Structure formats: structure tokens, C-alpha cells
Image (tube, rainbow, N blue to C red):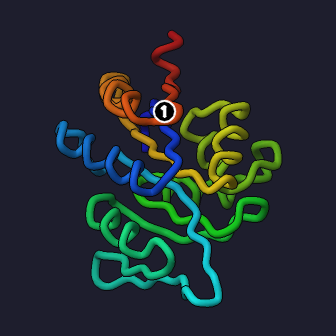
Amino acid sequence: MTDKNSCVAIYNTHTEAENAIRELQKSGYEMEKLSIVGKDYHTEEDVVGYYNAGNRMKYWGKFGAFWGGIWGLLLGSAFFWVPGVGPLVVGGPLVSVIVGGLEGALAVGGLSALGAGLFSIGIPKDSIIKYETAIRSDKFMVVAHGSITDVQKAQNILGVTAEEVNLHSSEAEA
């Protein structure tokens, strides 16, 4: 990802996050520029897991139907266990950024892999702490990536329904 512009929206439920992604899709936003982050937790009755089937990820667990629908829309998917955060499911280009963050987590001030990934796309550390806290609280994060015009469009759409929405851009500050 070369653009360091992003719009981050926080949602209380997976349904709200899914509806937000569908609204962006209806508006013509490129699905390849969207990421979602959330926790899925398991109980003894619900097995949590996933596997790749061709170019699609199959997932089951408490939110299996939700994640299964999201994987059909977004590019890339992963399941991480992040110390201090727990089980983390990620879809979209943020997957490769977090994988890169796994290598550089110590280099950016002891942030988690999620935090290092967010930092590498230009999100300031104080915001990262707030986003990680939201994820630990079982909320969902939708991240729109792209040009300043793209992320401003996403901000306008997501701002209607999100608990919180923030634009992060070096271009906006210039």
C-alpha cells in the first residue's frame, strides 16, 4: 500500500460494520481499498477456525456467517493471535500491513503487530492506542485506504453510522 491516507471508523457490532462496508460498496468505493478488523471469540460450544478454499477463506465460529460474507467482498484475510488483544480477524489490504508489522513491531516503540501495521500506514500512536482499546472491547474497525479524495469520500459515508470516524492523512496536514 503506497497511500498513507486512511479513514478509520469504529462500530459496536459486526452488523453495523458489515452495513458500512455494503454502503461503501453501493457508493462505488473500491472494495480492494477496504479493511476490517475485529475479534471473534469462542466458547466451548463454538469452534473457531478458518481455511483457504481456492481464493476464498472459509470461516466458522461465533460470527462465521458475518466473516464469510465479508471475505467475499474484501481482498485478503487472516486470523492472528495478538498478545494483549486476543484473537483478531482481519480482511483487506491491512492483512499484508500487519504481517509487515510483525517484523517491525519492536522497531516502532513496542507496539503490537496491529499497532505497528497501523503506524506504518500513517496512523499516529495516540490513535493506535484508542483503536486497540476499541478492538479489545469487542468493537469492529473499518479502514478505508487510498487517495485523500477516496478517504474523504469514505469519511462522509462512514460518518453517518460510525460510533467514531477519523481521517488520517499526511496530505490533509500539508
Secondary structure under tag 1 reads: loop
* Residue 115 % position (x, y): 67, 47
* Residue 127 % position (x, y): 66, 33
**40, above or below 94, in the image:** below
In percent of the image, x 51 and y 35: which residue is there?
Answer: 163
**46, above or below 100, in the image:** below
Quadrant in the rendering for residue 40: bottom right
Which quadrant does the N terminus fall into?
A: top left
In percent of the image, x 39 and y 64: which residue is there?
Answer: 76
In percent of the image, x 60 and y 49: which residue is there?
Answer: 117
Tell whether 13 sits left or right of 129.
left
Please state which amino acid type lies under the numbered disc 1. Lys
Quadrant in the rendering for residue 82: bottom right
In percent of the image, x 52 and y 27: which residue is there?
Answer: 166
Tell whether 113 sits left or right of 171.
right
Residue on which disc 1 sits: 4
Q: Nearer the viewer, residue 16 or 89?
A: 16
* Residue 145 % position (x, y): 40, 39
- The number of callouts visible is 1
**50, above or below 121, in the image:** below
* Residue 67 % position (x, y): 40, 68
Instruction: Count residues near mark 1 (Cα–Cα under 10 Å), then give few for <14, some for 14-19, many for 20+.
Output: some
Tell whether 121 sits left or right of 119.
left
Q: Nearer the viewer, residue 120 or 77?
A: 77
